[in-house]
Amino acid sequence: MATKREYTTEDTTSSAKRPKMENGNGKLDAANNPYLAHWNDDKANTADGLYDFKRHATTSKQASAAEDGPLNPFTGKSLSNRYMGILKKRRDLPVHKQRDEFLKLYQENQILVFVGETGSGKTTQIPQFVLFDDMPHKSAQMVACTQPRRVAAMSVAQRVAEEMDVELGEEVGYSIRFEDKTGPNTMLKYMTDGMLLREAMHDNNLTRYSTIILDEAHERTLATDILMGLLKEVVLRRKDLKLIIMSATLDATKFQKYFHNAPLLAVPGRTHPVEIFYTPAPERDYVEAALRTVLQIHATEDEGDILLFLTGEEEIEDACRKITLEAQDLVREDAAGPLVVYPLYGTLPPAQQQKIFSPAPPPIRPGGRPGRKCIVSTNIAETSLTIDGIVYVVDPGFSKQKVYNPRIRVESLLVSPISKASAQQRAGRAGRTRPGKCFRLYTESAFKKELIEQTYPEVLRSNLASTVLELKKLGVEDLVHFDLMDPPAPETLMRALEELNYLACLDDEGELTTLGSLASQFPLDPALAVMLIVSPEFYCSNEILSLTALLSVPQIFVRPASNRKRADEMKDLFAHPDGDHLTMLNVYHAFKSEEAQANPKQWCHDHFLSYRALQQADNVRLQLKRIMEREELELMSTPFENKKYYENIRRALVAGFFMQVAKRDGNGKAYMTVKDEQNVLLHPSTVLGQDSEWVVYNEFVLTTKNYIRTVTSVKPEWLLDIAPNYYDIAAFKKGEIKTALQRVATKIQRKEQEKGKR
Amino acid sequence: MGLAAPKNRSKISNDPQNTTWANNTERFGHKILTSQGWTPGASLGATDAAHKAHYTAASQSHIRVFLKDDNLGLGAKRGSERAENFGLAGFASILGRLNGKEEEVKKEEERQEKIQQRAYVYKKFGMMNFVSGGYLVGDKIEKGVKKEVEVKVEVKFEPASSDNEVTEKKSKKRKRSGEEDVKKEDEEEPKLKRKKKSVSLREEAAKEDAALEATSKWKKDKKEKKDKKSKSVSETPATDSEPLTDKARRKAEKRARKEEKKLKKALKKAAKEAAKSNPTTEDPSSESESEEESTPASSVPTTGTSTPSGLTYNPRGMHAVRQRYIRQKKMASMDPQALKEIFMIKTPS
């Protein structure tokens, strides 16, 4: 507490001493600054509702009066009827009751931790409360509110624009990767956390913002974590910057501690009690138990929708099918009302995702048993999506989690037990509209003993190469003592540093190189960025640009369970014998051909390709192209007739991915990664023939086995030629790979000698 | 994993932890980190951070994962991992006794025994679920205690239904049998066929419902239930043949009389009847009244047990066909005319 008070006092004194500072405290500026006198005139003319507001000294009463109109306090236009309707609803939200309390804490402190459960209205209301007090437009600044997801940023901005009766993109806007909908008038900007991080790279003090709100901080995304570490330092440098951390979890002490014991404001959510049931004994098969529970709920419980959490796409689709079948039987026997089942997972097309919001089916005949909908979802329904009407939650206690292992550089995507926090979050989903029930398919003792407290934040589970590059660009020199809420394992950081060093993004002293600084301009993995930057040297930057775009979007090949064979046949149409990268490139070129562009949607459907992914790739390509043009990187292609066309592309691939190479182990199917020497298998989806001894891979994942995915064959000579630092034969461990490389090296030497002789 | 379990071979690398890399202190990353003041073994992050107490183990070393390749529920153990499967349970009880926890051990053993008994009964006849109807005061049931009517639920034993653990869910008393059932399931699991499963699934759901309702009051009428159970067990075989609804039963009687006169049509009719009895003809809610309370005036139950039946097991698919077939055969053998037809004996009628 002592430290905090110190900040606030400093805050006022410092701005008093430097009244000229542009971002200084508005009290002085607005009233006394003669240069800003025209502001007052403007206000008088447009009847500005905020005319007599004193920055950081307003009350909720004043704000309410301004909100009531009749003129929009921000635009001066008259307010619509719709606005009034929304306003009434807004005032019923739980946060509204504590507006005064919030304002007081906000005005008195630089950092504030705000805890509000889902449904409290924090994401839409708090930024507006801030607007009325902070009035960023008067100092030509903005209020930023970060969201972990693009969709959330977009939809919330839309909603708030409606609530404030302004046009989206004017006073209220959003900014997400590859899309910026803001204007010169924008005073409230919703954005993804990654976007704010990118902005911080160019403007280390974030001077454009007077208040920054980090929403959904409990999700602990990589970008949010880095931002928190960064802002913790920025608030020391900029006393006028206010910071609000918003979280939905009850355990906010960690946030408070982290931010120098910042004060906490908690607002209860609009939630109903949720009764929790455990199984008396552990379940032998959680999927089957889940299905049975769903059917039982359907047959016996009162009206209300069901939310079932499962782990992956396949499991979910399978469960949906089974539940639908069984539910039909129940209906036939008149034992229950109709049941509609919707799957929900990340890779589902948005149109299908939208379906989950459709209402439950009506009874089959009037007066019959009420219908019900059942949503079978991955953990995206845990936090990201809020579905009203859910009364029953079935929680088997598992989710698929990505974990990176820095030692062998494998990313595993495995089914693992969730955390207690996560289980509580899931249960909470049942009480949104009325009292609900949560059925946990494990025992109470398993809940207590087997689950960890909190889900590991992303920063502990990811490859940090691009993060380290960002941090370097952000001017963080001392990575060891960078104050993260959860510092990553030292080995993870080491691995990241080493990768960047081999990619020549960091020099041997650990300083950012020109290449590194250029690579950080691209919102890509360092390996991809480097590949893109050096591609002009291989005369194929156009192709590599397409490939980079394709590699940074979700899977482009669609392989529905019902039609696998046909899908594989279609994929074979595009197959290139040298590997998946080239196959993807073929797909993209075919997609851009006139024939396909005539009706791209149909064409994609016919060829079992994801239209959405390809379109996204097209979009990403355009954005990357702009960056390349800005950085004056030449775009060129080897003529297609040239027999080196594909070879050049493969060589460029090596330039970025030389650290991700595997050599065939003996004559079998098994491969072994270079340097880390891990046994891996080619992912079954590959089109690569079995005769390639050396391959470069895009990902090394552990799913059911160690797999390398998206592989293309390369020649060992290229490795030695293009990445001599990494392929320093003397540094290799004794073994098959070393001897193979030695053999290649001597061959090259002999060839050169022969050349010299001639 | 038994010998019959599917083989899942995978080659393990020579150095799956990549200690060659981890132990190498000459690496670039190691160099940079030490130059910035990190010492091996320490975690990263600000020195004397206020929130240090909140750090997890994952800040020390990467998160360990393990490959889950089955659908085992949270906290469940594979067959070979359970103590009682290799006789350690008995050993535990000896140790318990030696530690002077006689009473607890005894309780535990009694519990196990009960589980076994229940499992036996379940296997043999199937389970009965009851819902409390209040307390018995004097001679009449006092309804004031609880408005709910008592429902006697008859659930027929289904040979293939091995997954009964869910049934036991949420019922404290029945919980105990859960473990036992798990064991049983393990044995029977491979035999499960998809079709059977689906039938049992639905049935289980229904049963579970009853269990759920009963949960709160289960303990109260434990005694009552015991009596009933012994009764119901003896009654079960009687109802085994066909869960007829009252209406259908009356029809059957009438028909039986008719059949004496019109022997020729008997076969056909029986088939029709069977078809009719399959789907629940009456609204389940109207049937959930119990026979103990008041038997519906209009219907006269023909057997001792009236099976109420929203939750009755209705044979479907294969079972239905089979039952119909058996019934037809019975009818035919009782009916001289039909027999003649079957054996193709030509007699002037």
Image (cartoon, coloured by chain):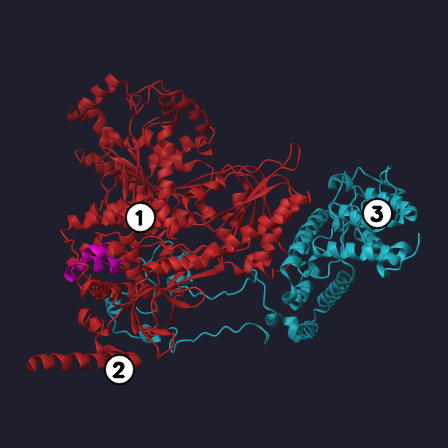
Chain colours: A red, B cyan
Image quarter where the C terminus of chain A lies is: bottom left
Q: Is residue A162 visible?
A: yes
Q: Left or right? Give the position of A392 relative to A715.
A: right
Q: Residues within 10 Å of mark 3 (few under 14, many from 20)?
A: many
Report the residue marked by disc 3.
Answer: B306
Q: Residues within 10 Å of mark 2 (few under 14, many from 20)?
A: some
Q: Left or right? Give the position of A332 relative to A82.
A: right
Q: Kindly state the secondary structure of the residue where label 2 is placed.
A: helix
Asked if badge 2 and badge 3 are on a common chain, one would say: no
Which residue is found at the position 20% from the left and 62% from the top?
A645
Q: Main secondary structure of the magenta part?
A: helix
Relative image position of residue A135 (x, y in whole percent):
29, 30
Inspect the image, locate mark 2, and give the three-letter code of the amino acid beneath it. Thr
Which residue is found at the position 65% from the left and 32% from the top?
A366
* Label 2 or label 1, whichever comes before in sequence order: 1
Foreground: disc 2 or disc 1: 1
Inspect the image, locate mark 1, and give the three-letter code of the amino acid beneath it. Ala
- Foreground of the two, B44 or B206: B206
Q: Chain of mark 2?
A: A
Report the residue marked by disc 2.
Answer: A739
Relative image position of residue A701 (x, y in whole percent):
38, 64
Q: Left or right? Give the position of B326 relative to B197.
A: right
Q: Kindly state the secondary structure of the residue where label 1 is placed.
A: helix
Asked if badge 2 and badge 1 are on a common chain, one would say: yes
Image quarter where the N terminus of chain A lies is: top left
Report the residue marked by disc 1.
Answer: A596
Q: Quadrant of residue B113?
A: bottom right
Taking the magenta stretch, the answer to whether it contains residue B22 is: no
Compute the Cα span from label 2 to label 1: 48 Å
